[in-house]
Amino acid sequence: MKITKSFLVILLALTLTACGGGVGLILGIISAGAVVGLTNQSDDDNGDSTTSNTTITDDTTPQQSYDYSVKTYDGSTDDLVTAGLGQQGLMSTLPAAVDSVNPSATELRQIAIAQAYQASQDRRSNFGFGSLYGPAAPTRFVVPSTHGKVAGKEYLAYADNGSGQQNVTMMVQIPSRFTLSEACIIAVPTPGFESVYAGIPNGGEWGLKTHCTVAYTDKGAGNGIHDLQRDSINLIDGTLDTASNAGKKSHFTAQGSAQMDLAAYYSTYPNRLAQKFAHSQQNPEDTWEKDVLDSIKFAFYVLNLDENYGNITTLSTSNTIVIAAGVSTGGSAVLRAAEQDQQSLIDGIVVISPVITSDLSNASFSIQQNTRVFSKTVYNKPFFDVLSYQNLYQACASANTAFGLEGRCYALRNANWLVNNVNLTDLIANAQEQLNNYGILNTANALAHYYEANSLYAGITYGYASAYGKFSLVKNLCDYSYAYTVGNSVPQTKPISDLADDFATSWGLPPSSSTYLINNQGNNGNGINYRENTDNFGNQEGYLAGAFCLRDLATATANSTLIDSTDVNQVQVGLNKIKASGNLKNKPTILVHGRNDALAHINFTSRAYYGLNQQTRNTADSLTYIEVTDAHHFDSMNQQYQLNQTPLQYYLTQALDIMYDHLKNGISLPSSQVIRTTPSNGASNGFPRITQDIESSASHCPITFSDNTLAIPKC
């Protein structure tokens, strides 16, 4: 049975009212200011679908609104986990729409789910896909079908403050084998900046296999693109419409500023594109915790509909296990949701590789790994600060690979940011030394080359700077913009066939799906892919001036002529709003992180958060910290680049098994530990590097916190 906790039950009142030729619902949800309005949206997919018109109001808070629809999947031709492809189909090439210019919502959903698996998992069977993890892999409690398909219902909804500018997407999936006697909800915020479907392989799949309802949210950062030339936007299902026609149903419509409207901007900067996370002017990360909690409330509402479990008071926090599970930015959202959970909605937490920035202002501990000690001055750096620093140096540190820029090394030397009068080899070594002295682990060095190959540091740094400052795209922050381009040509009109599937194939922050980060100054002011930018000496240096500008925004300085003190202050205000407290309100938590993570570097994220929790926690807090050697942020890169790294997806599955067993049956959580993995060539008769599971006793390699020191053993 479920372990006892303090409950604040969501109260729901139900009233029936006539609506046109049928019957609609008016529901009142009374819960600490949770106010939503629901209006139906038609579903153009084939199959069984239902819509209803519902309004929820409250006298104490502004009205919010959801556009929602529901679709039933039979688990054969289409399903909740694999979109009908089955596990084997997910291992194949990405599906394509029949008409690439006008893909249907059904096709976009299938492509998005398949893309989510490709982007997040190593799908090689000899590396564990399908047996250790994946749709058909067993959990501790369930052996799924060989194809991994799950039948059930899928609800899709918007949450908004009435402006149509937030339009946070939420999705609830109810598997057909969900039972009231063992009711459970898994809350899964989207990792990164993709659609809600990206949450399926990152926790949702486990929940559906285990017969739990899954509540997803894209955190207000989901993939949405506005093509200014065509006035083209996405609807909630990914299909295209014009912004003028869609109105508040648009997933994202860009806005100008008091200084420049969109028309004036486009006439000066043609063919530019706006992306939701960077350009919504909402700083979505500031409300990620609310989005997660709202998705859980929405799941309870959906489950308690007459069409599902018959009585509006059937399910509540008192008889339903709720686990919040997040990967990457989803992990950050989950931790902060737990910290802000005033209604005790969440019972347990599982987090993998969180992109978390902690408020360490009152912390006073050190991190010791083997004989090396990292002081607070080293690890007390926000994620945005780390990104901006690596964005400066990594292109040079990778210059001896196929992914770096030799010109960045020379440009940094000319700017006196690297040692002078030395050869390229020494410049590369000096750039790497700068990064490691900053606090980045040596074990992340090799992986960082592949992250640089995907322009992650530049792309994410600009995206966060724009989001934190709530800047419109017309701001041209640091003289960057987004556009489709080829090579070193000027920005061009993005092909409609490419634009039409962006919702499904883009990860939400360029460079992605043929949308690139542009230096507006290049090509004589007409714009150029930032990577192709050359300086006055002919060095291809990746627009170092822009990197310096972003670094100034992170360090609260305004040395760059591209920004002023107002810009800096806006970014710093936004940054300060997203810091985590480390107080998990006594919720049992398992936090897993790969030591080689070259994006959410472990010193600044999980280690810093765990140390903060241990120093400031309530004595009843139960946070297990698992550090996995030879693992990093993106399992998909293991397959893409044939890397011999441990797939963290396996430990996500295992951590969810353990947490569910803890909440359902009362088993003890394991203690904090390092999991040492062993290299393997991924031969068909064995699996790579997974030689240890998460143990209930970690005496062989314990992580400890005592005397204000977080000790990470060598193992």
Image: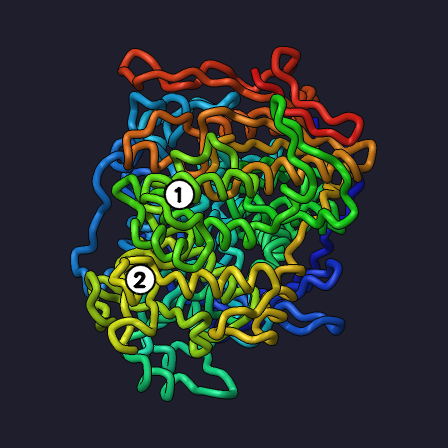
Q: Is residue 16 visible?
A: no
Residues packed near mark 2 inside 10 Å, few (<14), some (14 to 19) or many (20 plus) = many
Quick check: 401 left or right of 481? left
Q: Which residue is mark 1?
A: 80
Viewer-nearest residue: 692 or 600: 600
For image coordinates 28% across by 40% down, the residue present is 401
- Residue 61's mark? none
Quick check: 85 left or right of 625? left
User: Residue furthest toward the right?
Assistant: 619
Q: Which amino acid type is shown beneath numbered disc 2?
A: Tyr
Viewer-nearest residue: 116 or 458: 458
Residue 522, placed above or below residue 686: below
Q: Quadrant of the N terminus?
A: top right
Q: Which amino acid type is shown beneath numbered disc 1?
A: Leu
**Label 1, label 2: how many angstroms apart (C-alpha)?**
32 Å
Q: Is residue 629 visible?
A: yes
Answer with the quarter of the image where residue 662 lies.
Answer: top right
Under tag 1, what secondary structure? loop
Residue 628, placed above or below residue 188: above
Viewer-nearest residue: 104 or 392: 392
Quick check: 523 left or right of 248? left
Q: Which residue is mark 2?
A: 516
For image coordinates 54% across by 42% down, the residue present is 326
Mark 1 or 2 closer to N-term?
Answer: 1
For image coordinates 70% across by 50% down, the residue present is 359
| Picture coordinates of residue 384, whole percent (x, y) | 55, 54
Viewer-nearest residue: 299 or 244: 244
| Picture coordinates of residue 207, whole percent (x, y) | 50, 36
| Picture coordinates of residue 622, whole percent (x, y) | 73, 30
Q: Quadrant of the C terminus?
A: top right
| Picture coordinates of residue 619, whole percent (x, y) | 83, 32
